[in-house]
Amino acid sequence: MNGDEEIEEELPTDRPSPVLIAASVTARGGALWVPVAGLLTLAGKGKAAKRGLLAAAVAMPVGHLVSLVVHRRRPQAANMPARQALPEHPDSSSFPSKHAVTAAAFGTATALEDSGTAVFVAPVVLLVAYSRLRTRVHWPSDVLGGLVIGALVAFAQARIGRSARARATARRLAAVVRPVFSGHS
C-alpha cells in the first residue's frame, strides 16, 4: 500500500457535508473564483482579485496539459456515498487535481499582491482542495501536486509582472534622463 492509499483509507466514506460538496461543485472550471474576486473587489482589493483571476486562467490549462502527460487512474470509489455526492463523475487523468491547481493559483496570486487577502482566500483554497479528497475523486498526491503547480504558476506570473513593471519604469526613467544628458559628453 502506498502513501496515497493509506491516507485515503483514513478518509470517511459517508456523504460529505453540503459545504464540501458545494465547494467542489462550484470550483469546477474555476467558476468559484469569479464571485470570490468580486467580493475582493468590493472590499477594495481589486488589483489582487485581477491577479488571482489571471493566475487561475493561466493555471487551468497548465493543469490540463500536465494531466495529458501524466495518465493516472482515479481512486476506486465509484460506489461510495462520498463519491456519489458529486453530480459529476470524472474519468479524466487524476493528476493533478485541476480544482487544486486553479485554487492555489488564485489564492497565491491574491496573497502575493495583497497579503491581507490570504486570511480570507486561503481557507477557501484549502476547503476546495480537501473537498476533492473527501469526495474521493483524487488521491492526496493529486491534490498536493495541484496545489504546488498552481502556486508555481502564481509565482511565475508575479515574477513576470515585476520584470515587466521594472522594464517599464526603466524606459520611463530613460525617457526623462536621456534629454538631460544628451547634450553632454
Image: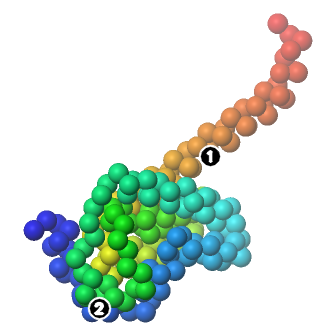
Give left or right: position of 117 versus 171. left
Quarter that holds the C terminus: top right
Residue type, label 2: Pro
Q: Nearer the viewer, residue 122 or 31?
A: 31
Which residue is rendered at x = 34% and y = 63% of the image? 93
Where residue 108 appears, x then y in whole percent? 50, 61
The quarter of the picture where residue 146 lies is bottom left
On residue 103, which mark appears? none
Please tell me whether mark 1 or mark 2 is closer to you in this view.
2
The quarter of the picture where residue 114 lies is bottom right
Where residue 42 appears, x then y in whole percent? 71, 76
Q: Nearer the viewer, residue 155 or 61?
A: 61
Q: In this orientation, does residue 114 appear?
A: no
Question: Which type of secondary structure does the marked residue at label 1 adopt?
Answer: helix
Where residue 156 appears, x then y in whole percent? 51, 47
- The answer to which of marks 1 and 2 sits earlier in the sequence is 2
Residue highlighted by disc 1:
161
Number of on-image labels: 2
Give left or right: position of 74 versus 63. left
Instruction: Give neighbour class at mark 1: few <14, some 14-19, many 20+ (Cα, 10 Å).
Output: few
Which residue is rendered at x = 44% and y = 89% of the image? 19
Q: Nearer the viewer, residue 23 or 154?
A: 23
Which residue is rendered at x = 52% and y = 70% of the image? 29
Residue type, label 1: Gly
Residue furthest out toward the top:
185
Where residue 22 appears, x then y in whole percent? 47, 86
